[in-house]
Image (spheres, rainbow, N blue to C red):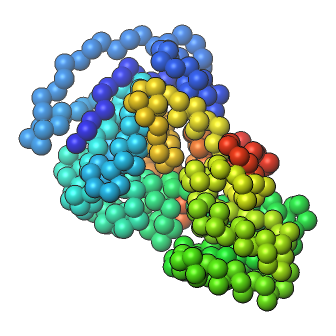
Amino acid sequence: MAEAHDRPQPSRRFIGAGLLAALLLGGCQTIVPRGRDGGPPPPPVPAQPEPAPVPGGLPNDVARHRVALLVPMTGPNAAVGRSIADAATLALLDTGAGKVRITTYDTATGADAAAQKALADGNRLFLGPLLGEDVRAVSAAARAARVPVIAFSNDATVAGNGTYLLGFSPAQSIERVVGYARSKGMTRFAGLVPTGAYGRTASAVLIRAAEAAGGQVVAMQTFDRSPASLKAAIGRFGREQGYDAVLIADGGRIALQAAPMLKKTASPGAKILGTELWATDNAIRSGGVLNGAWYASVPDAMYRQLGKRYQARYGRGPYRLASLGYDAVLLTVRIAADWKVGTPFPERALLDKGGFGGVDGAFRFGRDGIAQRMLEVNQVATGTPVVVSPAGKGFE
């Protein structure tokens, strides 16, 4: 288990967009905490001796909240898990979160076992796991112990009953890009979706989003991600009614294969749309046949600043999902300001209608446990995508 080191007591005021930007741009400069009303900083707290370890090996904290970070640290997803854990540590350093102790537990050796160990160690909040199947494995035990789970998955089926999803929602991404396309006069939509759960969700959301925006879906084809199946699905579009825009509900590499073929169908001038998967796929940065296509994602500007600081500290670039670890810690630190040590985590605070801010922009949790996010619409260009519709700054 990797454990983050402690830092001085943070300010009780939330790190909002302005201060967060300053943190990311400020390199390694020291951030001086200030009082609640912007006055002088509180007097320093005298150093306390480290408590003796409990039988499990962790210090018996009486002044800090114990929070578990559950991510894969070994196995095939270890690099992503390490990136999330490192970003979480960076957030602790940036905020000076002296009231929070975060301990990392490896879910690759068994998510249920990791959760049981974390509960036995006295953790009152879980950040993670990453995979939907691992969220299922830990949620029941966590719920019985009154420990909320803020997971990094985007699998909506595991949300609710004390489990909150911080992952990027494909449904929200499709709704946003379809709404933007409709605002530009497009009314007839088509969908090219993979077989499986993601494709079924994308199909249903596309139909719902098009109708809600005043448009309609006039064609829908599925494929099994093989080149032959993709070609056959696109070929069937030639026999469908004309459409103004076509959603490719898959990653950038599939989109790069599909785009040239789509341009030869019955609607060769149709706008190509993508999902949040494109934001984490560097393949689209080659531009080419996808130049001009639109997709919706969380804002990327502050993440790029985080990436530079991460690179400077760790000597390597982060995975895109590292921002979830950073923002989960920011959220924890904000709530910890009014969370009495030794008591259960105040879960109701997660349902603040005004939402929260972080590297990935503004978000808030609904009653269903899914993070509602402010998304931007990007246009693919060679190199860095161009923002054509900025994300909102907050919630009313």
Picture coordinates of residue 285, whole percent (x, y):
64, 49
For this rendering, which residue is in front, 197 or 53? 197
The residue positioned farthest toward the bottom in the image shown: 239
Q: Is residue 172 left or right of residue 388?
A: left
Q: Is residue 35 left or right of residue 89?
A: right
Picture coordinates of residue 339, whole percent (x, y):
41, 38
Point 43% across, 34% down: residue: 316
Picture coordinates of residue 166, whole percent (x, y):
50, 53
361 lies above or below 192? above
Residue 191 occupies which quadrant of the picture?
Answer: bottom right
For this rendering, which residue is in front, 128 or 202? 202
Count of numbered tags: 0
Residue 103 occupies which quadrant of the picture?
Answer: top left
Q: Is residue 182 left or right of residue 326?
A: right
Q: Is residue 97 visible?
A: yes
Q: Is residue 125 visible?
A: no
For this rendering, which residue is in front, 22 or 101? 22
Point 36% across, 68% down: residue: 133
Point 46% across, 32% down: residue: 310
The residue positioned farthest toward the right in the image shown: 185
For this rendering, which residue is in front, 27 or 103? 27
Quarter that holds the N terminus: top left
90 lies above or below 234? above
Point 72% across, 73% down: residue: 261
275 lies above or below 17? below
